[in-house]
Image (cartoon, helix red, strand yellow):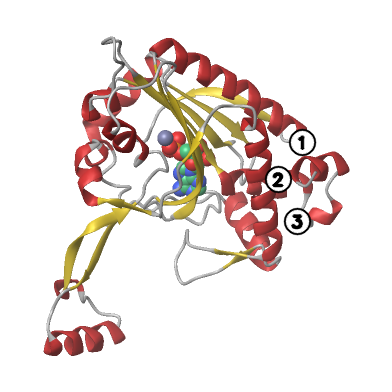
Amino acid sequence: MVAYREATAEQAAFLDDLLGAGLFVATEVDGLYGQGAAFARVLTGFDGAVSRLAAADAMESMHFPPLLTRYQLETNGYLGSFPHLAGTVFSFEGRDGEAAEQESIAARHEDWSRFQTMSDVVLAPAACYPVYPEIAKRGVLPDGGVTVDTGAAWVFRNEPSRDPARMRSFHMREFARIASPDDILAFRNLWLARVTGLVGRLGLTAASEIANDPFFGRAGRMLAANQREQELKFELVAQIGGPEPTAIASFNYHQDHFSLVYGLGFADGGVAHTGCVAFGVERVVLALFRAHGLDPQRWPSEVRAELWP
Ligand code: AMP
Ligand code: ZN
C-alpha cells in the first residue's frame, strides 16, 4: 500500500475552498487535480517572475518531458533513497485475446496488472535528473561549469493526501548547477537571497530552514540526519494549508553524488560538484491564494505587478 498522508482539518478545508472556487478541478483520487484558468494564470505569472530573476545569468535551457528513462532511475540512486515516491510506466504488450480480457477486467475496476509489462520509461520525480547525464556526455566541463534551466516540468511523487499542497503531479522549476564546490555554494546562497526577495515582494511570509529529504526506511533516517548535519538542503517555507508552514522551494547541494555517478569533472582534473534550486510551483501559487484570497483580481497591486508586469 502507498503511504497515505493524512491532511489536517485546515488543509482539507482549504482543498474544499479551492475546488469550490474552480481553482482546482477534482478527479477520483487525492493529489491529482486539474487547474482552473485563474490558477493556471498565476502559475504562468510566477514562472515568468522566476525567469526574470535569472534573466542576467548565463544559462542553458533544457526542457524534458514528464518522463525519465528507466535507465536513469536505475543509475542515479533514486530507488535506494526514495523507492516509495517513484512511479514507473507499464504498458500492454500482449495479444488479441489478452487485450479483450484486460479490457473486461479493467472495466470492472478489478486488478488487470498481470497484462502489463514494465516499459523503459518512468515518471520524472524531479526536473533536474535528466540534466546530469546529458552534461556528462559532452565530456569535461567548461571553465566556470554549467547552469541549466529546466523550465517548469511536470513531475510525479507518489504521496496521496487531501492536503492540497501535497500532490502526485505538479510543476517543478529547477536551476541545476554543475561546477566547483565553491561555485555551488555561492550559487545556492545567491538563489536563496533572490527567492527570499521575490516571495517577499509577492507578499508571502517565508523563512529559510535547514531541511532533509524524505529518505526511505531505517537507513534513510541516517541519511536524513547526515544531510541536516552537513546543511546540504535548505527549504523556504510558507503558510499554505497549515498549521505548519510548507516548503515552497528547496536549495540542494548534492556534493559529489551525481559527479561520481556520471563522471563529471574539469579538464585540469578539478572536482565538479552539483546543486540545484527547485521551486514547487503549485505550492507557491497555493501560498499566494492562501495569503491574498481566492480572487487574483483583488490581490494587492504590487503583487499583481510582480506577476504580470
Ligand atoms: P524536493 O526535490 O523534494 O526538495 O522538491 C522541490 C520542491 O517541490 C519542494 O520544495 C516543494 O515545494 C515541491 N514539492 C515536493 N513534493 C511535492 C508534492 N508532493 N506536491 C507539491 N509540491 C511538492
Ligand atoms: Zn534538483
Q: Gap in Å between the C-alphas at discs 2 and 3?
A: 9 Å
Residue drawn where x is 86% and y is 53% of the image: 298
Q: How many marks?
A: 3
Quarter occupied by the C terminus: top right
Ligand 2 sits in quadrant:
top left
Of the residues under marks 1 and 2, which one precedes in the sequence? 1
Of the residues under marks 1 and 3, which one precedes in the sequence? 1
Q: Does the Cβ of the disc 2 residue fall within 8 Å of ligand 1?
A: no
The reply to whether callout 1 and callout 2 are in contact (CB within 8 Å) is yes
Tell me if mark 1 has few (under 14), some (14-19) or many (20+) residues whose alpha carbon lies within 10 angstroms of its own.
some
**Camera-side residue of 57 and 106:** 57
Residue beneath label 2, please? 288
Percent x, y of residue 1: 27, 57
Residue beneath label 3, please? 294
Amino acid type, callout 2: Leu
Tell me if mark 3 has few (under 14), some (14-19) or many (20+) residues whose alpha carbon lies within 10 angstroms of its own.
some
**Secondary element type, mark 2:** helix
Amino acid type, callout 1: Gly
Residue beneath label 1, please? 203
Residue 167 shows up from this direction: no
Residue drawn where x is 29% and y is 15% of the image: 267
Left/right of residue 296 with respect to residue 228 in the rendered view = right
